[in-house]
Amino acid sequence: MLTNLHVKNIALIDEIDVEFERGLNIFTGETGAGKSLLLGSINLALGKKMTRETIGKFGNYALVELSFTVENPALETAFAQMGIQLEDDQVILSRKIMEGRSVSRINGETCTVGQMKKAATLLLDIHGQHEHQSLLYPEKQLDILDEFAGEELAAFKKQVRDCYEIYRRTEKELKECQMDEEQRVRQIDFLQFEIQEIDDAALQAGEDEDLERKFRKMYHSRRIMEALGRVHGCLGYDSPACAGELVGQAVREVSSLEGLDEGLDQIYHTLLDIESMLNDCNRDISGYMEEMSFSEESFQEVQSRLDEINRLKGKYGDSIEAILGYRKQQQAQLDGLLHMEERKERLSGELEKAKEKLEQASGQLSGIRQKAAEELKDAIIGSLEELNFLHVEFAIRFERRNHYSGNGYDDVCFMISTNPGEPLRPLDKVVSGGELSRIMLAVKTLMADKDDKEVLVFDEIDTGISGRTAQKVSEKMALIAAKRQVLCITHLAQIASMADAHFLIEKSVKDDVTITGVKKLNHQESVREIARILGGTEVTDRILESAAEMKEMAQVVKNTRLK
């Protein structure tokens, strides 16, 4: 359940904290008091786009925070799969909004807006003022039917999606085969040219790296030879100043002292090692310089081969491996073009099989839907009768689309008749705004038992109704609130009287600044607010008595209906 809403500096709100209760949480207030800010703040926390007016006049940022207590083990599992660890069975969704950007967090950890929305869909279901209009769209009606069918339908929908993906992919491949002969010949010539060009190069894996090493060595050969010549001169025996001659002289000098002092033996052997290392180094330099010789023709061959490989890289890939991979890909395409008729025949057979499987899967899906539609029809009729539709008939009409989709081939249409003797007609041809609101309420009631959402939010779902119908709607709301926590913004006294917790949204002026606030009402304050709704600006004692009586009767109805 939603335990707390904290809002800071949004529009006319300075800072509010709302502590919610189980059951039916009702919000009322005069027109223009800011009732829409409540739902707007919740939507902002859940990732809704911001406007320039989002941040109020009471600071340089806005903040919305929703605190939930999770009581359903299925929801705990769902959050764990999202990588969200609950803290004392709590989930806290927050969004800090600054100029031009916002930061969303779940249990204190930064997250994306997408992650926030996904978490929100697990926790609550929001029904805005105009959402009932979506009932007029066949796509929404099909979604409602599928949601009502539940788990039984889910496996069949996945099967249809998988079959459709195979069908669509095969159909696309077959369409790619539909080209005229002239175009096919041109494509074959082009592919053969590319493949032949790569084959003529006779590329070997790693060849380019070996050639680049050779090229660097050849290109810098003169610099290398000159430097090694100088090094050989320094280390050799060509002059008394060379290292080899000097070390040899040092060896002879120490050798002449042999036997005079045993301590000189270590020095003598060290000098011998140095002389040996110099001789080895000079031999290595001489050998390298001898092998360094190469012809200008060899250099040109290496350079030409590298140029050819780099040219192919510019056309077909940034490495020899990529070029050979491209060649393999083009060969496969060429083979397909050379054997186009055989491929078309094969794909046509595969497409026919894919279509048969898709048809079968779509038929099974449609069968499950039609079975669920009968149950949904009866359930909606029962729920509508409870909402004061006295002579209602309802049906779900199925039509087959002229094409397949990942959702099968069904189109559905909700049909209704609200007066005796009138034929069933589509919703958009019959119902008024108030009737549509009640139909959506009936649907929401039925869906409440089909998911794990613990919180339902209704924003003025009572639009366009009054009198006996309003009473029926209020009883339905109380019935839903017995199983789920409900937040409802209303302007009807009948619904307000059913509140388990009643909140007043009102404006006030502080230091010449208009502020919207939320106040939780006690019993007497709730009665007075209900009287205001009943009587308008002037609340008389008789209206107060009526409001108190309405509150008492609501409690009796709740106790009776919920036993």
Image (cartoon, rainbow, N blue to C red):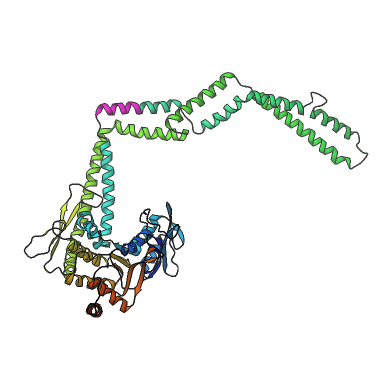
Q: Quadrant of the C terminus?
A: bottom left
Q: Does any portion of residue 371 appear in the rendered image?
A: no
For the point 38% across and 28% down, which residue is it? Answer: 194
For this rendering, which residue is in front, 442 or 493? Answer: 493
Residue at the left extreme, as displayed: 421
User: Is 461 left or right of 303, judged from the image as shown?
Assistant: left
Horizontal placement of 71 versus 218: left or right?
Answer: left
Q: Residue at x 16, y 70 (%)?
A: 388
Magenta-tinted stretch:
178-191
Q: Quadrant of residue 471?
A: bottom left
Where's residue 561, x and y in %?
23, 77
Toward which corner of the image does residue 140 lie, by quadrant?
bottom left
Q: Position of residue 237 (x, y in %)?
A: 79, 25
Asked whether residue 232 is in view, the answer is yes
> Is residue 302 found left or right of 324 in the rendered image?
right
Q: How many marks?
A: 0
Residue 225 x, y percent position in the rendering: 67, 24
Quadrant containing the N terminus is bottom left
Residue 520 vs 120, above or below: the answer is below
Q: What secondary structure is the stretch in magenta mostly built from?
A: helix
Left-right relation of 470 to 91: left
Which residue does the image show at 54% across and 28% down from the upper left? 211
**Is residue 235 magenta-colored?**
no
Q: Residue furthest front?
A: 512
Kindly identify the residue that appears in the image at 33 percent across and 26 percent down. 189
Residue 161 spot, x, y in % from top left: 27, 51
